[in-house]
Image: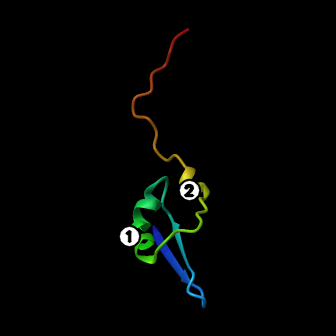
Amino acid sequence: MKTIHITISPSGETKVETNGFSGGECREASQFLEAALGEKRSEKLTGEFYANHSQPENQSQQEG
């Protein structure tokens, strides 16, 4: 399941965390929140960001 969690600290600092997205989908999904919340101070990418879930449809084999 794809989810976006927003945490707001007592000092007003916010944290946006996405789960269940692969590759750049997380950035696309949370872009509107990040724009509304203001300047991004840091970003931590998880393994899901680097995951490659798609396989090439046409793979050719070379005979040697």
Point 41% across, 66% down: residue: 31
Residue 37 position (above or below residue 61) = below
Give neighbour class at mark 2: few <14, some 14-19, many 20+ (Cα, 10 Å): some
Disc number placed over residue 32 in the picture, else none: 1
Which part of the image, by quadrant, shows the C terminus? top right
Residue 5 position (above or below residue 50) = below
Task: Name the one closer to the observer, 18 or 37.
Answer: 37
Point 38% across, 70% down: residue: 32
Q: Within the image, what quadrant is residue 37 found in?
A: bottom left
- For marks 1 and 2, the one nearer the N-term is 1
Point 46% across, 74% down: residue: 38
Disc number placed over residue 54 in the picture, else none: none
Question: Where is residue 19 drawn, in percent x and y?
Answer: 52, 67
Please tell me whether mark 2 sits on a helix, a strand or a loop.
helix
Please tell me whether mark 1 sits on a helix, a strand or a loop.
helix
Mark 2 = which residue? 48
Residue type at numbered disc 2? Glu
Q: Within the image, what quadrant is residue 44 found in?
A: bottom right
Point 56% across, 56% down: residue: 48
Alpha carbon distance from label 1 to label 2? 20 Å
Residue 53 position (above or below residue 40) = above
Task: Name the one closer to the observer, 3 or 32.
Answer: 32
Task: Name the one closer to the observer, 29 or 53.
Answer: 29
Give neighbour class at mark 1: few <14, some 14-19, many 20+ (Cα, 10 Å): few
Residue type at numbered disc 1? Phe
The residue furthest front is 39
Pair 1/2: label in front: 1
Question: Where is residue 29 drawn, in percent x and y?
Answer: 41, 65
